[in-house]
Image (cartoon, grey):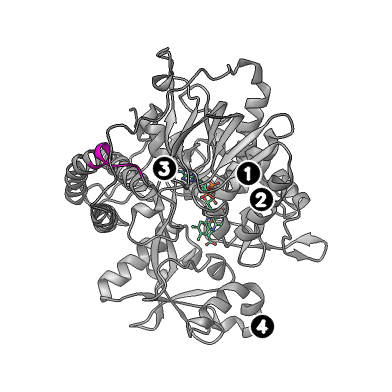
Amino acid sequence: MNEADILIIGSGAAGLTAALTLAQQHKVLVLAKGPLTGGSTHWAQGGIAAVLDAGDTFDNHIRDTMVAGAGLNRRETVEFVVERAPRAIARLSELGVPFNTAGADLHLTREGGHSHRRIVHVADATGRAVQAALLAAAEAHPNITLLPDRTCVELITGRNEERYSGSGRVWGVYALDPSGKIGAYTARATILAAGGAGRVYQFSTAPRGATGDGIAMAWRAGARVSNMEMMQFHPTCLYHLGVKNFLITEAVRGEGGRLINPRTAKRFMEFYDPERMELAPRDIVARAIDAEIKRFGLDCVHLDISHMGADFVRGHFPNIHEKLLRLDIDMTREPIPVVPAQHYTCGGIVIDLTGRTDLPGLYAAGECTESGLHGANRLASNSLLECFVFGEASAQDILDRWDEFPMPPTIREWDESRVTDSDEEVVIKQNWTEIRRFMWNYVGIVRTTKRLERAAHRIALLHGEIDDYYGHFRVTTDLVELRNLLQCADLIVQCALRRHESRGLHFTLDHPETDAEALDTVLVP
Ligand code: FAD
Ligand code: SIN
């Protein structure tokens, strides 16, 4: 048994922010699946939203967030996060994140849905710099232990106590180590910061490990999950047969990039959102591209910023420019072929302003949560911000209430007495591919009740097959991920079937209208 004061699942922006705050007073253990840089944080491009410009106000940022979120946001959360943004940026600067500057100030770029320049960034690879700075600080801290290559399988609750107490409290997690052994990692408090569930879709900008493990584990342990139908599709993922998930940052449109229909050679956003054009919120731009692709039978549309001049393009987007050159696309001279792809999980584990979940001893922060910030559609560059604010808020609440957290009792060992090694790995690959494909085709950008019901039917069949497999064979990371992908697909479809309106990211041809009242879809286990 491994014991820490506090256990954190996830080494991205949310997990490491929490770890650095807690380590001032306590021993912290951070577990990550695969490498410590394996989450979405490392891949973030555009930047972090914060009111830093003299002409900008918190009210503007709050309004933009709620307009993008189609009114489903909780205003209290939006205010809480927006007001803490400048301090979060200051903390990152202190940690050494080399944000781009313009004279004495930080350079602010612009993205869709923002009424002002508001995005601080490190060129077009902000996440890499943020992840590196947080990791360097965590590695240097004597109170933080970082353990990569630990796949958390299931939260430890009252059900796993040696002397069963029946309490709903969370005491840590069972995790698989590289030798294939599952061990118990216990703590007085646990923070889930395990990222999103993007890989539930066939096309996604998210990294391989974004399989919704945190959401699925919390749900199975008894926590409520909400608004899972609100899956964000980024309008501009590179369309290339050899490269599956390379994002072209929204800042390309923010800095003047135009979307062109390659058949008509015309800008098409004027037919969908003539005022905001390419800078309309993501749901609108992604649906517009989807509509053009379907109407004209296209493979992709074009994103063109070549008119801004080669120096400007190379200066603002050095990493994207270089990556595309390696694929024989010169964005200083020609348009970039793009398609929408899943990008962000707006829904998740229900938390309050202190990061508490429904389960005593369990906190959550970052993309695995539904905090009320994003509502029906996340405003660009608000999600790293949410990680910093709720990573710190959850840590602070644990520090404030430390004496209320009991020591963990003795926990039962993981029982492997009735399982054998699998001789049918093909089942995992087949089911993984099947889930991602039907989710893309039936639960994508434009939905219908019939397609959602088809997906629900497939999910019910796969539940039987995968549960049976899980019950008989030794657990592997692939199997854990498959089980969690299916769980998340189920939660997404259940939420989507319950929402009888179109709002933000949930657009269904059977209910195209938006209800007068905005209500969360809350699933209770
Ligand atoms: P992550 O950074 O995803 O980290 C998850 C952690 O959980 C990882 O350490 C992982 O190993 C661990 N984990 C997962 N499952 C398990 C398990 N079973 N056991 C143990 N550990 C586990 N947002 C912005 O605000 N601005 C941007 O510019 C921006 N650009 C983006 C570009 C791309 C390509 C992508 C994919 C996303 C972008 N986002 C952006 C979104 C943002 O990056 C994420 O929402 C944010 O980084 C999530 O951080 P997190 O800490 O919640 O999770
Ligand atoms: C991007 O750079 O376009 C991603 C920004 C975000 O997801 O917030």
Instruction: Say which amino acid is labelled 2.
Output: Leu
Tell me the magenta residue range.
Answer: 469-475
Look at the image and tell me in which quarter the C terminus lies: top left
Residue 376, image x, y percentages: 42, 45
Which is more N-terminal, label 1 or label 2? 1
Q: Nearer the viewer, mark 4 or mark 3?
A: 3
- Residue in front for this viewpoint, 212 or 38: 38
Residue 76 in sight here: yes
**CA distance for labels 2 and 1:** 7 Å
Residue positioned 61% across, 36% down in the render: 29
Label drawn at residue 213: 3
Q: Is residue 52 above or below residue 17?
A: below
Label drawn at residue 311: 4
Q: Is residue 522 left or right of residue 384?
A: left
Residue 62, image x, y percentages: 58, 44
**CA distance for labels 4 and 1:** 36 Å
Q: Which residue is mark 2?
A: 135
Q: Which residue is mark 1?
A: 16
The reply to whether the residue tagged 1 has its Cβ within 8 angstroms of ligand 1 is yes
